[in-house]
């Protein structure tokens, strides 16, 4: 049936945990033969949510081991929610962020039940909605995973996966600490690679005054209170950086640039229903879609609605809109429309927006449409030559720090890690032609170099958005996690023996 090859130290660790579970009356069967193994690579929100939903189906009769490889201490948080920074806030109201898409208020209910905002006087925004700290959402997910980890239904193995090799019908998954397991199904959930360093900054790669990845913990630790700063990239991460600098008492000048100078937009003053129908007569080209959006924007305005309602409709219908477009048109959208889409779609939390506005009105922050033409270091720090948009002139400046906030390099994801590069060499995964991640079929399974669906290999989380379209905001990511768990559950149900004795916590108690 199946086989788990596990290193001796891991076997011992498992045995002691299992013994602990038995003491608590949760009878486990480590020697039971008819079990299947699911390896989830990456335990951010996606990996954590899939593990949770799979564990739930286990209660319904599936005998499986669910092993999540995740180097972070907390499972379910990942890049977005594994942060202790107090100014990092969720940018979607709490009432729409949930582990359970069929219960959108689940996180908000948890907040109220646990009085989780008692020390956060700023969470409630003027629109009457809660935008808690991002770390709190990470705690909510971890809280719901905890009973499954305690019961042994889900294993969190704290190590990076370094290699995945096809072995007959199974996969050998090898981690950096020497553990190797054989898995029947592998789920790729290592979503966000580090940002790519713009080529023009490559000469500064080893300069301590270049902060190449602003999402790393303590990324801003070396910034002095009066440092002159250049931020490259104007999106939500830049806004996080500006708010975090203010909270640290930074008073130096900040210049924030992006090619188009676009800034992430805020939320509507009042909650509105989505407005617009983009599916009855679906667009066949990117330009047709844009034309329809513009027409709908005018209609919305005439009815006293703001653009938010139209963009919300596009987002809600986004996956279907995307899937009806030919790949060449999707590519066109990814290349030309995405910067505009991102700043309207990913809205800034009101508290972070207020910090950015304060910095602008105090004259500390300048936002510019410009690119870096050249950069280097000299005795005065870092010098940059900037090329403002639509200008032939360049401007030379000295700064103390350059902070890169251009976002994860999803287009280069297959080269970002040895295990992905290895899967690509084996021909088991291919880059999505849209440049948005890894190519997969509509059921989430990877597509190999020959265009065939790969059994037992799933692409989870936003890396699948080239196929599905809008799949980055938490509500869509949560939906997709449920879908993948159900799909994997169907695969497993065909093989697994029921595990009726396994004790499992219920959703209500979790
Ligand atoms: C900074 C940020 C803030 C966001 N804020 C919001 C928000 O407020 N609201 C909203 O709706 N959406 C938000 N999003 C979007 C969305 O919620 C996230 O992108 C989503 O949580 C994706 O989670 P994930 O688990 O797929 O990816 P990730 O969070 O990237 O998790 C992947 C995990 O894989 C692990 N990993 C990587 N390589 C390996 C390996 N080789 N072996 C084992 N593990 C590995 C990493 O340690 C990481 O924990 C935000 C995104 C970001 C980046």
Image (spheres, helix red, strand yellow):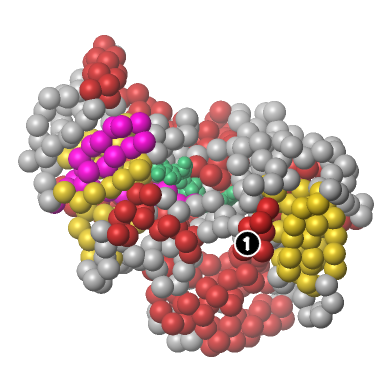
Residue sitting at x 32%, y 53%: 422
Q: In the picture provided, is 202 more to the left or to the right than 408?
A: right
In the image, residue 131 lies in the stretch drawn in magenta:
no
Residue 472 locus on image (x, y percent): 50, 58
In the rendered image of this protein, does residue 359 appear above or below residue 429?
A: above
Residue 281 locus on image (x, y percent): 45, 86
**Which residue occupies the extreme front position in the image?**
379
Magenta segment boundaries in residue numbering: 169-192
**What residue would you read off at disc 1?**
198
Mark 1 surroundings: few (<14), some (14-19) or many (≥20) residues within 10 A: few
Residues 411 and 282: in front is 411
| Secondary structure type for disc 1 | loop
In the rendered image of this protein, does residue 249 appear above or below residue 202?
A: above
Residue 498 locus on image (x, y percent): 13, 37
Residue 144 location, quadrant: top left
Residue sitting at x 33%, y 37%: 175
Residue sitting at x 11%, y 46%: 495
In the rendered image of this protein, does residue 368 appear above or below residue 161?
A: below
Residue 222 location, quadrant: top right
Q: In the picture provided, is 77 more to the left or to the right than 438?
A: right
Question: Does the beta carbon of the residue at mark 1 sit less than 8 Å from ligand 1?
Answer: no
Q: In the picture provided, is 390 more to the left or to the right than 334?
A: right
**Which residue occupies the extreme right position in the image?**
362
Residues 124 and 143: in front is 143
Residue 92 visible within the image: yes
Residue 236 locus on image (x, y percent): 66, 55
């Amino acid at each position: 049936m199946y086989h788990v090859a596990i290193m001796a130290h891991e076997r011992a660790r498992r045995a002691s945990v299992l013994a602990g579970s038995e003491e608590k009356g949760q009878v486990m069967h480590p020697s039971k033969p008819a079990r299947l193994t699911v390896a989830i690579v990456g335990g951010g929100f996606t990996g954590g949510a899939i593990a949770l939903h799979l564990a739930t189906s286990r209660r319904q009769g599936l005998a499986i081991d669910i092993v999540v490889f995740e180097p972070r201490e907390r499972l379910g948080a990942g890049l977005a929610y594994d942060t202790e920074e107090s100014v990092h806030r969720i940018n979607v109201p709490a009432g729409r962020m949930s582990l359970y898409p069929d219960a959108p208020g689940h996180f908000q209910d948890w907040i109220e039940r646990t009085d989780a905002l008692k020390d956060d006087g700023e969470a409630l925004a003027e629109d009457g909605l809660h935008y808690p700290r991002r770390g709190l959402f990470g705690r909510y997910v971890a809280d719901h995973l905890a009973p499954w980890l305690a019961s042994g239904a889900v294993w969190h193995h704290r190590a990076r996966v370094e290699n995945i090799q096809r072995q007959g019908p199974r996969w050998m998954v090898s981690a950096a600490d020497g553990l190797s397991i054989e898995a029947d199904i592998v789920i790729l959930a290592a979503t966000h690679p580090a940002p790519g360093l713009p080529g023009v900054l490559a000469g500064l790669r080893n300069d301590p005054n270049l902060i190449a990845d602003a999402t790393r913990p303590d990324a801003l630790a070396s910034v002095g209170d009066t440092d002159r700063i250049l931020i490259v990239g104007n999106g939500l991460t830049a806004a996080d950086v500006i708010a975090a600098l203010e909270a640290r008492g930074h008073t130096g000048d900040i210049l924030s640039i992006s090619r188009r100078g676009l800034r992430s937009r805020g939320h509507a003053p009042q909650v509105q229903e989505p407005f617009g129908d983009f599916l009855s007569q679906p667009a066949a080209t990117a330009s047709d879609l844009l034309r329809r959006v513009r027409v709908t924007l005018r209609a919305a305005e005439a009815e006293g609605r703001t653009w938010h309602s139209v963009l919300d409709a596009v987002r809600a219908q986004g996956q279907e809109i995307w899937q009806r477009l030919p790949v060449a048109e999707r590519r066109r959208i990814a290349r030309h429309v995405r910067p505009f889409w991102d700043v309207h779609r990913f809205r800034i939390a009101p508290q972070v927006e207020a910090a950015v506005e304060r910095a602008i009105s105090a004259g500390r922050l300048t936002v510019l449409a410009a690119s870096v033409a050249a950069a280097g270091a000299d005795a005065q720090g870092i010098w940059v030559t900037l090329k403002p948009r639509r200008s032939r002139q360049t401007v030379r400046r000295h700064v103390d720090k350059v902070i890169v906030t251009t976002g994860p390099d999803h287009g280069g994801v297959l080269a970002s890690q040895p295990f992905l590069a290895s899967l690509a060499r084996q021909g088991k995964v291919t880059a999505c032609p849209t440049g948005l991640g890894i190519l997969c079929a509509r059921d989430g399974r990877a597509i190999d170099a020959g265009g065939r669906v790969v059994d037992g290999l799933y692409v989870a989380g936003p890396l699948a958005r080239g196929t599905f379209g809008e799949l980055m905001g938490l509500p869509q990511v949560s939906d997709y996690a449920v879908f993948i768990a159900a799909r994997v559950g169907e695969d497993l149900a065909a093989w697994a023996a029921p595990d009726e004795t396994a004790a499992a916590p219920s959703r209500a108690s979790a």
